[in-house]
Amino acid sequence: MNTSSDDPSRRALLSLATTAALTAAGTLPAFTASAAPARPTEAPLPAGSSRHRLWWRAPGDEGSLIEQGLPVGNGRIGALASNDPGRELLLITDATMWTGGLNDTLDKDGQFPYGRTEFGSFTLLAELTVDIPDHDLGAVSSYRRTLDLSQGLATTSYVRSGITYRREMYASHPDDVIVVHFTQSGGGRYTGTITLTGTHGESPTAAESFGATLANGLRYGAAVKARGTGGKVTVNDTRIDFVGCRELTVVVSAGTNYAPDATAGFRNPSLDPERLARTKVRDAASESADALRRTHIADYRALYGQLDLSLGTSSAEQRELDTWERLHARTRDLLPDPELEADYLQFGRYLMISGSRDSLPLNLQGLWLDSNDPDWMGDYHTDINIQMNYWMADRTGLSQCFDAFTDYCLAQLPYWTKLTQTLFNDPRNRYRNSTGRIAGWTVAISTNPYGGGGWWWHPASNAWLCNSLYEHYEYTQSRAYLAKIYPLLKGACEFWEARLLPHTLPGTTEEVLIADSDWSPEHGPLDAKGITYAQELVWALFGNFAAASALLKKDAAYADTITGMRKRLYLPQVSPKTGWLEEWMSPDNLGETTHRHLSGLVGLFPGDRIRPDGSTPKEIVDGATAQLTARGMNSFGWANAWRSLCWARLKDAEKAYQLVVDNLRPSSGGSNGTAFNLFDVYEVEQGRGIFQIDANFGTPAAMTEMLLYSRPGHLELLPALPDAWSSSGHITGLPARGGFVVDVKWQDAKPTSVRLRSVGGRTTTVEFAGRTRNVVLKPGASVTLKDFDR
């Protein structure tokens, strides 16, 4: 095997990557380095780990891997795998592999250009194929592939000539590589070739690696190493050959020289991604396959094991079916399959751990692609999608995975602020401030990782992004984190201080503050003032900023100003014509009744102003319920997830559950539903489906909201427990806003065991069916509550 003498040492590379990540705040991560991992001695399996396995009887079709390939990832690099016995194909991505650039101009219509050249697109980085010609699918039997959610392992097994062959695949976060390990039992051998190629017409520099540069100056590269036992591995000009190997370990890594630093133009010019990838695969290949596996599992389990869930017991007949068959049976027979439903939530957690660690956040497609032209460029939509991607992180015990979202906003803030100051009040922008004043920052509907915008300006997006960031504080209670995001909150408030307009309500002398012209995503008039969407988001933003100011003892006078403005904000009323909570400052419905977005209901979820607990006027709750009812129960996957969350907040368990189940319907021919590999897809035109990952995260978030409602100072157990899950179940490690973690077991829809642990919270009330307990805890302490089942 060839090893280049000019490979830099790991220490030098770590130093380069660390230097590239330093910013004025010193808070942004290095995307390209991984420290030499500690090797654990063992990684015990979790109890009941068989509950956490998905399996299929067929490999993925290379022509449709977005719906059939199994996803692996370590938060930065990922792959879709075919798991074909004779030809293993990996479509490899890096979260930072983006075309385009700052995109800091407006067209004649006041929009940011929105195409793959100027705005840019998330793209593939490489393809890896392992060809084993005599293991063609037609020559094998007893094929099975499994995704072990509890250990982060994708496994393929089959029988050929009486010998069982097995391969195991995973993406290691500590080693920063993807590993494919081939074994067999009974004297079998592997003979074939390994090929690593780029996906943008690159000329390979060697069989084991390549490097290139995109038109925007982004450098990227990939590398592979192979090690065999009992046979021979040789490196040729364009491929790696292996002959007669009893075992084979293939290790691949990839990356770019993207840096989360606006002052450096989002580049580390001194970093050579190809050389770094070669170093990583060389280091990983020097370890035993067992050591690599144990290290990966220990790291993965540290996150995955933070939450455990049972929603009941499935039947023996259901357990005998593979995952695709179970999805069909669940839809056909209309019988609950509680273990499958729990696994769907855990699959979302698997995707979160695999797609959101130490790099850019999850975009419209997460970390996974099957082409270089994803729909909407695989961007970061700020009018629901990036927010929904992270609703489940804290709610399912994966607060660490939220960091990528925070770091993205912090890294982009300098350019977001610059574009706002220079372009938002441009006369071509239909949403410019009527006041003529400008301050702070906001973004467009679409954003890329270079500070740029796409499509229309989206004024209220800054409030929604900040509210998502602040909610993370409510879960973690970290003052250091709150101080880190404080500039984002303050800049957003400054923007709205300059934007809000005084307005006298008709027939009164009352003067209120309303948002300037805006669009309620993504329907209705393009230039309405005082839309509910903006009013609700800004109301929450102002409250969050005032709370942050008090907690950090900063800007007291300005916080008083913002609090005063909050009291004057107009809040939506119920239309006397429709009986719905108004989405616009009009009694008429100005949009599409069954539209996919629930923009007028952001105060119900993800906001928390509208509550069915008596603290909100009944007519407002009834108006929100009427609008939600009118929206219907059949939409795209992500829209169904949002509807389910809203019904859970309204404590309608059966409607919330029905929408979860509807998202589990098998997709056929691109129709809305769950694909073969459990990715959510929906039909945009006859026969063409789109993968959009937010439903895979929004639906698990809805499931947790059905089991626990929380806000700082108050928790409610099993607020929307459906009949299908009511017999018995448990969830442990369930985070709650206010700084607590909840374990709850239930029987016959009543809690039988409740345990609270503080992760920073001190006081809260705990409620079930109108009965409450007051809890006072020191951080780190826990308490067991009794008698809720009586």
Image: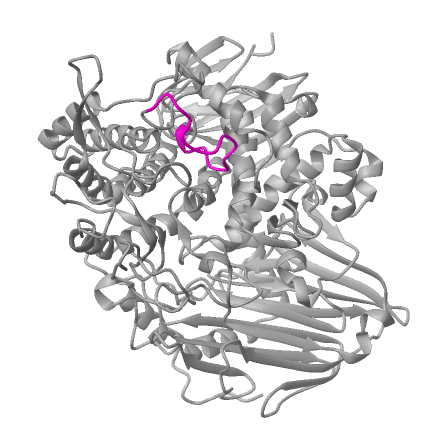
Determine if the magenta segment contains residue 418: no
Point out the residue furthest to the bottom here: 237
* Quadrant containing the N terminus in the rendered view: bottom right
- Residue at 40% x, 63% y is 115
Q: How is the image coloured?
A: one colour
* Residue 176 appears in the picture as rendered: no
Percent of width and height locating residue 601:
42, 28
Percent of width and height locating residue 393:
46, 41
Looking at the picture, tell me which residue is in the foreground, 718 or 764. Answer: 718
Determine if the magenta segment contains residue 596: yes
- Residue at 60% x, 61% y is 170
First to last magenta residue range: 586-600
Percent of width and height locating residue 416:
24, 53
What is the quadrant of residue 140 in the picture? bottom right
What is the quadrant of residue 762 in the picture? top left
Judge from the rendering whether residue 166 lies leftward or rightward of residue 551; answer left or right. Answer: right
Judge from the rendering whether residue 277 lies leftward or rightward of residue 1; answer left or right. Answer: left
Percent of width and height locating residue 327:
73, 42
* Quadrant containing the C terminus in the rendered view: top right
What is the quadrant of residue 275 in the picture? bottom left
Give the vertical position of 537 relative to 709 (above or below): below
* Residue 623 appears in the picture as rendered: yes
Looking at the picture, tell me which residue is in the foreground, 740 or 672. Answer: 672
Give the vertical position of 710 relative to 4 (above or below): above
Judge from the rendering whether residue 149 lies leftward or rightward of residue 6; answer left or right. Answer: right
Count of picture labels: 0
Judge from the rendering whether residue 736 lies leftward or rightward of residue 789; answer left or right. Answer: left
Magenta stretch, overall SS: loop
